[in-house]
Amino acid sequence: MHIIAKKPIYSPKLDNFGGTVMGFEYGITEQYLTKNGKPYIYRMGEMHYSRVPEDRWEEELIKMRDGGIDVISSYVIWIHHEEKDGEFCFDGNRNIAKFIGICKKLGLPFVLRIGPWCHAEVRNGGFPDWLIEKTQGIVRTDAEPYLSYVQRFFEQIYAQVKDCLDSVLAIQLENEMRKQKNYMIKLKKMLIDIGFFAPFYTITGWGGADSPDSYPENEMIPLYGGYPEAPWLDNIDEYFGCSNFLFSKERDDENIGGDLFGKEDKLSVKTNATSPKTPFLTCELGGGMQATYHRRPIISAEDIFSLIVCKLGSGTNGLGYYVYHGGANPVGETTMQESRETGYPNDLPIISYDFQAPLGNAGQIRKIYFLLRALHKFINSDGERLAPMPAVFPDEIPRDFLDIEKLRCAVRSDGFSGYLFVSNHYHGGKMKKISELVKISLADGGKTEIPVKLDAHAAGIIPFNYKIGSENVSWLTAMPQGEDENNIYFAKMPGIEPEICIDGKSIVPLTNGMSVGGKRLVIIDNGTPSPSSGKKIALSDPVTSQDRSFFDHIVNFDGTLPEFAPVNEYKFKLAADVKYLKIEAYGNVGALYCKDKLVFDNYLRGDDWIIDVRSFAPETEFVFKILPLTKKDKAKIFFEYDMPIGNITPTVYGLTDKIVYVD
């Protein structure tokens, strides 16, 4: 396998963008962002303030920062702030100014995804019911009275955030909007006239939204996305991954927005990777995946890590995770989730928005958190050097994303040294060990050869011609993590044996404490703590009920109604020292109640629930309800876990841990 390394090309500055945020000067070129004049790769994590309790914001944002996130983003969900016409709410977990203030306190710039439409698996895509009624459904266009209501909403947001705009790095306009250039221009002008300002204005670029007829190219920057699965698909077929698990010039995920763009053209528009003349930046790389009623994928740490390695190796210079932190939908006059009942394509849980994210709905820490933390340390250490490096691809590539015989790889380099990005994984793939000799031709006529050996599901970054102290190392299979005066740090990569080749010939194990070029090598193992176990809680004997209120909105993907079996109800009480509940449940749908109020629900998919119960008093009684899975309903749902049919008693554990770890 042969790759020809390329030197970086001149990257002219884009003059219409940039500014100072929290003491740092940000700019942009055609290839990358700059921070104080130096190439910069951001690590942006999405957390929806209105889906996380206000008193948890700071501790969760600290977890995000400790995981290497350096920018926070959030949608402003209109229905969360103005469920009733003219009645605005900005207190509690809707206090956007307080949230941005905490981000600023922690040194985290904020990206305001202001909408007005956001999707986010919210009722009406975030629009209040009254707006749909008063506009007769004529929304997301430059028509009245819609634009007047948008202006009123933006003015209310501005009144809240005007004193903290100095920490706003970017404002995203709309979401998944195509062929409405005049509308996008009017939205930006409206924001500026109201008083908003930011160094960058962005849009989502997938599905053809980066075409010249969709936005003003010199005023907004398209950002891209990519997910490991697509639970919004209108089928229950097994999903074998997509181009996101390949190294490619393609910026677009052909599946994002496929449920809303329309069946006739959901795959008809492909992004031209040579246009627009802006960097390859992202805002929605799947930090996990939310289950819908009809599709219930289980996302692994390997899914997410491999996807991110592929995107970084393909040339992206900004990592934006959607979402990095899960949450829970508030409940108001109505429920707030996307549903078929409200005319949208998918049914979502009423409360749960866990998303299988690095940090879950209750702040539980998943394995992927630690893998991404190591990758973020690499970017923090080597990102300034990496950002100008173009991505190049081998002469032999996998025939498609199902090909498990051919190594998936790419190189980013300065023509002489750089990084080999490798992967041996895709979601749902039954991978095997793979070995391949990768020959990299350098700009000076030289050549570096790297014998790549990957276990099944491995992915990583291999530096080559890498400077360690006074020594130029041919290559090593560990990820750089930074250095100090005496030490240089590297992280082990799962499924890749740490080795080093100093002279281009001799390959030796990379061991902790070995000396190279006058530097001591420190090898970091980013092992995940064992999952929190807890103490089993005694449940009452089940009571059979016909109460179906927590799932009466559900419709199968084919338009039929589920075959509702009697619901099983289990009661239990909260012990004094329990902070979280862990629930192992099998069936179709589950819901936790306290005093007839829905606390949490989810579509069961075979993994554990974690629920934060720190706000409940000791001896509080809960009722856990399970709708069993029937054979008929199982045939209309895509499960990755082989969910059993019939009545199965759940297991509930009380966790006293301050921090909860899960697989």
Image: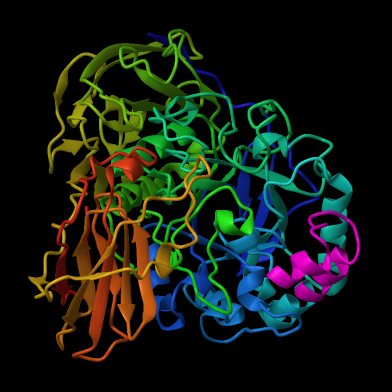
Spot occupied by residue 419 in the image (x, y as percentages of width and height): 40, 29
**Is 601 located above or below residue 206 in the figure?**
below
Instruction: Classify residue 593 by image quadrant.
Output: bottom left
Magenta span contains residue 148: yes
562 up-or-down from 473: above or below = below
Q: Identify the residue at image location x=69%, y=69%.
A: 129
* Residue 614 occupies quadrant: bottom left
Position of residue 52 measured from the top left corner of the image (x, y, whole percent): 45, 73
Asked whether 482 or 66 is in front, the reply is 66
Is residue 572 found left or right of 209 in the rendered image? left
Would you place residue 93 above or below residue 477 in this image? below
Residue drawn at x 89%, y 49% is: 182
Q: Is residue 83 left or right of residue 462?
A: right
**Can residue 112 be seen by looking at this rendering?**
no
Horizontally, is 595 left or right of 445 in the view?
A: left
Magenta stretch, residue numbers: 129-153
Q: Residue sitting at 25 percent across and 53 percent down? A: 587
Question: Where, quadrant-wise, is the N terminus in this rendering?
Answer: top left
Q: Position of residue 456 (x, y in %)?
A: 22, 26
> Image check: 364 left or right of 576?
right
Q: Nearer the viewer, residue 160 or 23?
A: 160
Residue under the point 28% across and 79% down:
613
Viewer can see residue 262: yes
Residue 489 inside the magenta-drawn segment: no
The image's colouring method is rainbow
Residue situated in front as seen by the camera: 184 or 106 = 184
Residue 622 x %, y %: 25, 80
How many labels, in total?
0
